[in-house]
Amino acid sequence: MVNIATRVPPLVNRGVLPHEVQIFTTFNGAAPHWQTLMVDLAMTVADLKMLFMNDPAVRRVLYNIEGFNPDKIQFYISGRVLALEEHLPLLIYNVAANDTIRARYLLVGGMAKKGTKKTICKMERLAVMRARVTHQSTLVQEPANMAMLNPLASPEFSTQTIGHMNDLQVVMQLKTVADNVTRGDKLAKAIMPNLFPQITIMKQQRDELERSIKGAEQAFELGFSEKYCTDAGFEVAPFYDLFEDRINALQIHGSQQAA
């Protein structure tokens, strides 16, 4: 018997978003373990596994599995023989509301050793990236920020940008950055600040905004606490009295205007 508390960390509570859908999962086809989950279609299968394993009924079953290993849990959907790939988002598999996803615990064989490198074909890699960009674009509200996504997503953006560089030092600096990258899949992230300097400004603005938000929250909490905090704790009854006083004042004012 294994205590799975260290294997299945608690999931942070999250609000239900407009694009979340309800799906049903079952563990090894056992009826008592049917469960309903609210999932974000942009979440990965690995995220789904975390939600699944944090269900109390499922945890009780997993607790009784000797040598429990979360890597042995795989998910399947109807019409597909192969297990869902954990690094892929659910929307890749066309998961929709009220779909059923089967969870299976592999008791013997089946899975590659942990740490084994998985080969991902170009089409699959691009499908995942395109899905992420599409999902993120639905969250962008500023037209100017939306407009920058298409040029950045163009396969010719990097070559055209470098081709128009006229400053030798800038080109040499970019080459130095690229030369220090040892993995091809890390190259894009490393050189982007040189090809798209606005990203640095955006990050600085984000950091400043986060500091301002934190400062505003702390400042308000200080003022509120100074007003209503006592040595015995918070005494907030006077705060709620404000609503009654203000409502009465507004009703009187409205009556006087009507007269």
Image: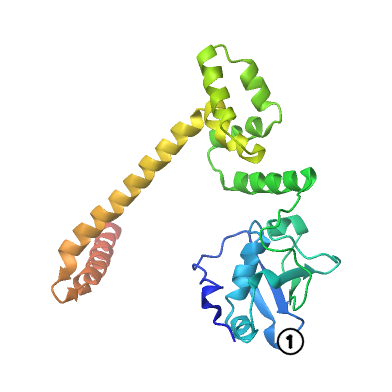
Residue 35 vs 204, above or below: the answer is below
Residue in the foreground of this view, choosing between 237 and 243? 237
Identify which residue is drawn at 51% across, 15% down. Answer: 169
Left/right placement of residue 236 relative to residue 7 reads left
- Give percent across and percent down for residue 219: 24, 53
Q: Residues within 10 Å of mark 1 (few under 14, many from 20)?
A: few
Among the 4 quarters of the image, the one containing residue 123: top right
Disc 1 on helix, strand or loop?
Answer: helix
Identify which residue is drawn at 70% across, 74% down. Answer: 24
Residue 219 vs 182, above or below: the answer is below
Residue type marked 1: Ala
Res. 121 visible in picture = yes
- Give percent across and percent down for residue 179: 59, 28
Identify which residue is drawn at 54% across, 82% down. Answer: 3
Residue in the foreground of this view, choosing between 257 and 18? 18
Left/right placement of residue 39 relative to residue 27 reads left
Image quarter where the C terminus lies is: bottom left
Give the residue at mark 1: 31
What is the residue that sits farthest to the left in this orientation? 231
Residue 253 vs 77, above or below: the answer is above
Query: Number of callouts in the render?
Result: 1
Residue in the foreground of this view, choosing between 18 and 27? 27
Res. 143 visible in picture = no
- Give percent across and percent down for residue 228: 18, 67
Residue 249 vs 147, above or below: the answer is below
> What colour-coding does the image apply?
rainbow
Image quarter where the N terminus lies is: bottom right
Among the 4 quarters of the image, the one containing residue 192: top right
- Give percent across and percent down for residue 93: 77, 59
Residue in the foreground of this view, choosing between 159 and 239? 159
